Amino acid sequence: MPEIADVVLSAIMVIAPTIGYVDQYRIILKNETSLGFNSVTCAILCFAKLGKRFDNTLLFQSIAMLTAMLTLLKLVVKYKPHDVPFTPLIRSDSVFSSSSSNSSHSSSHHGAAIEQRIELKWYQRTFWDWDYFIDYVNCLLMFTIIVGILYIFLHEHNWFIESLGFLSLGIESTLPLPQLLTNFKHKSVDGFSLLILASWFLGDSFKAFYFFYQSSPIQFVACAIIQLTFDTIIVFQFIVFSSFFKKLLGLRQHVALEHGYEPIS
């Protein structure tokens, strides 16, 4: 009986962390856009998982999470909203005609511009903002190979193992930050899964409590507090950027206008 319980608990530990990202997959597939989700989240989880040493349960959890991240990332690329820069080109008919009969027609087109779309090369784009899924896979493979080679030559040195663990922990502590910045940029949480936020908030709350209770090293406590702080800010974003709050704010602006006050920007 205890063995069955151990298997069930292990299965929950493997599957539970991926549930929120399955819901995010569903949201992107339904909306046919990944605008509300920051794909850097996938990068942080992939880089933080690669290079760690695990027991069997955590190893399977890592494999499940990496599989979920790659599957989600492929969908994010497919429904990526392209914000391609452009350069204005002056129309040939924008030059003033010497004929007075055509002057009004020409002046109406003066300064008119055509948007010439420029497709950026992969190396011109921001890191982790490529157009093809294979570019992300190549990046992860290169990272894995580099870490693997370093591990082969340096695994006997304790400082290397400690540095690898500290780097992994530091990367993981920034997990909610990209999504937080995206929410601020769009002034909206549309397209982001509430289940992911719930898993972050509950998981990080438990980690912070556990590290405090176990008197864990200060770096573990600090990273847990940083993550929980980011999670809390996103919770407030879900409240402030909710349709109910926006309607309430709109009502207040309307009342302010009726009394001669400037609306809230």
Image (tube, grey):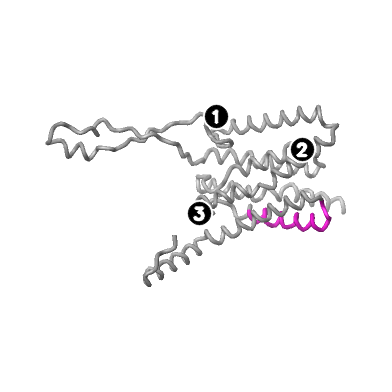
Residue named by callout 1: 123
Q: Which structural element holds mark 1?
A: helix
Q: Which structural element holds mark 2?
A: helix
Q: Nearer the viewer, residue 30 or 169?
A: 169
Q: Residue at x 80, y 35 (%)?
A: 160
Residue 121, percent from left and from top: 51, 29
Instruction: Identify the image quadrant of the C terminus.
Output: bottom left
Residue 77, percent from left and from top: 55, 38
CB atoms at circles 2 and 1 under 8 Å apart? no
Q: CA distance from mark 2 to mark 3?
A: 36 Å
Dot 1 alpha-carbon crowd within 10 angstroms: few under 14, some 14 to 19, many 20 or more: few
Q: Can residue 115 be found in the magenta stretch? A: no
**Residue 149, quarter of picture:** top right
Image vertical order of residue 262 relative to residue 42, above or below: below
Image vertical order of residue 118 relative to residue 22, above or below: above
| Picture disc at residue 164 | 2
Q: In the rendered structure, which disc, 2 or 1, sits on the residue that comes first in sequence?
A: 1
Q: Residue at x 59, y 42 (%)?
A: 39
Image vertical order of residue 201 relative to residue 111, above or below: below
The stretch of residues the image draws in magenta is 197-216
